[in-house]
Amino acid sequence: MSTALDSSAVEVAPALEAVGVSKHFDGVFALNGAQLSVQPGEIHALLGENGAGKSTLIKVVTGLYAPDEGQIRRNGETVAFANVRAAHGAGVVALYQELSIVPTVSVAENILLGAETPSRGGVVSWGRLNKRAGEQLARLNQRIPLKKLAGELSPVQQTMVAVARALATDARVLILDEPTAALTDTEITDLFTVLRRLRDEGVAIVYVSHRLEEVFELCDRLTVMRNGETIVTRTIAETNIDEVISTMVGRPHGLMYPARDTATSEVVIEVDGLTGSRVQDVSFRAHAGEVLGVGGLAGSGRSELLRLLAGAQKQTSGDITVAGNTLRHAGGVGRALEAGIALVPEERRSQGVILGDSIQDNIAVANIPTVSRAGWVNNRAIARIARSALSDLQIKARGPRQAVGQLSGGNQQKVVLAKMLSRKPKVLLMDEPTRGIDVGTKAEIYRLIRRLAASGTTVIAVSSELPELIGMSDRILIMHQGRISGEVQAADADEEILLSYAYGRTA
């Protein structure tokens, strides 16, 4: 736990402060008197469920939105940022989960993007440009090749380049939105080292994350929002994870995971000797009403296994049999869907939905045979399915015609689920079903998974979070180097056993 703040910090004007900020859209309040105060040299977590108002507040303090009421203060002085550039000029920079990295130019050019380019007589001075970019990476203790194309970097390297760009603009308030979503455990450790170094330099950091374990490891204080309002601000030492969850959802934490005991003895899917580029000779059975969890370290083959089952990746050998019917090797996604296998992918924004299209159009795309006849699309059928999905999955939206890109991450995930569930699959494959989703929506997803299992659906879910694997599954398979290294009943599992299997050891 960090201890950067001391008693003298109380006397220093906040690096960034939002006072009584309200913002409404179409008569609906997104923010209602919200408060946030971040000190220099502090890592401050901003928490809340999807839709709590965190993103709107960030957009207000960075100049994307003007507040309807309230004030933004920088170092104790009231400011009114006309746009993002004005906020940057005042040293306030936000880095979002989808980093604005230009993949086709060099690391050095990305770092100085938007800054004055060193030049002489209209000709770029590459030596001075690389020197200035290198100085920013050195502040972060990073050794990323300056001439390398940014698109060739790892996710954590791209994050470091984005942070270095912020420092190049003399950022003194750095806002990070879900910065670890695409990072491995080792990469997260590296990022935390950098953030602590920046904190020690006096940079104020606002850290937005749904991973509460990270918050309690990294941050000094936290602020919880709910329904557009600030509920509480506390030091990390004054609270705990269960209390934070209860504050976020507005009710006692209770049981996150529903009861199990929905599995039957009926085998729905049989996999024998399945092999792909990374998966090697995988065999297992899964039953009606069973939630089969699949875990393993990054690169173990767990996600590829789901893609092979869904026909999204070509298998080189082995058999997949669903309800007694063996799928053809070259059948592809269409053949798998016809057989009753549906995949909810990990990358929902790029693979699961069309962000610019409406909820009902996204659902219709996956269900053309159901909503059309003789080549004509039945708009009433589409609307009926969409309205049913909004109700059944409790999707928070203005209506079925709202664009998916305007929804929160958790509600986008529910739209992906709605697309697949409207096909009534025998086997539902879910890759990281709750990644980037707040704790309240996570609990909803777990309840939905268990309701599907109770109706006889077989759910096969990949997760990198061991507590989630144990809590949501009936049985767990762990993969190591493309093979199943261990199998355990979830009721008998603990994290030590699963980690042993994940590293290829006998528990």
Image (cartoon, helix red, strand yellow):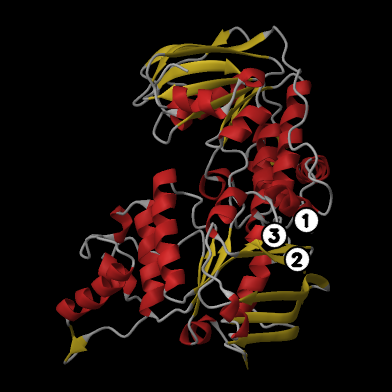
Residue type at mark 3? Answer: Glu
The spot of residue 151 in percent (x, y) is: 32, 56
Q: Compare marks 3 and 2 and give the one earlier in the sequence.
A: 2
- Disc 3 designates what residue? 238
Which residue matches tag 2?
232
**Does the rendering let one see residue 321?**
no
Query: Is residue 171 shown above or below 402?
Result: below
Whether the residues at callouts 2 and 1 have beta carbons within 8 Å, the answer is yes
Q: Identify the residue at image location x=73%, y=61%.
A: 52
Q: Nearer the viewer, residue 385 or 232?
A: 232
- Residue 448 at x, y = what percent? 75, 34
In terms of image quadrants, where is residue 171? bottom left
The image quadrant that residue 108 belongs to is bottom left
Q: Amino acid at mark 2?
A: Val
Q: With respect to residue 131, does 267 lie above or below?
A: above
Foreground residue, 463 or 488? 488
Rounded to the nearest angstrom, the CA distance separating label 3 from label 2 is 11 Å
- How far apart are labels 2 and 1 at the CA level? 8 Å
Q: Earlier in the sequence, mark 2 or mark 1?
A: 2
Look at the picture and state if 57 lies above or below 121. Answer: above
Number of disc labels: 3
Q: Are marks 3 and 2 in contact (CB under 8 Å)?
A: no
Residue behind mark 1: 247
In x, y percent, where is residue 434? 62, 42
Q: Name the residue at 29% across, 53% down.
A: 152
Q: Which secondary structure lies at badge 3? A: helix
Q: Secondary structure at mark 1?
A: helix
Q: Residue at x 42, y 21 (%)?
A: 330
Q: Quadrant of the N terminus?
A: bottom right
Q: Amino acid at mark 1?
A: Thr
Q: Could you tell which of marks 1 and 3 lies nearer the N-terminus?
A: 3
Can residue 47 be seen here?
yes
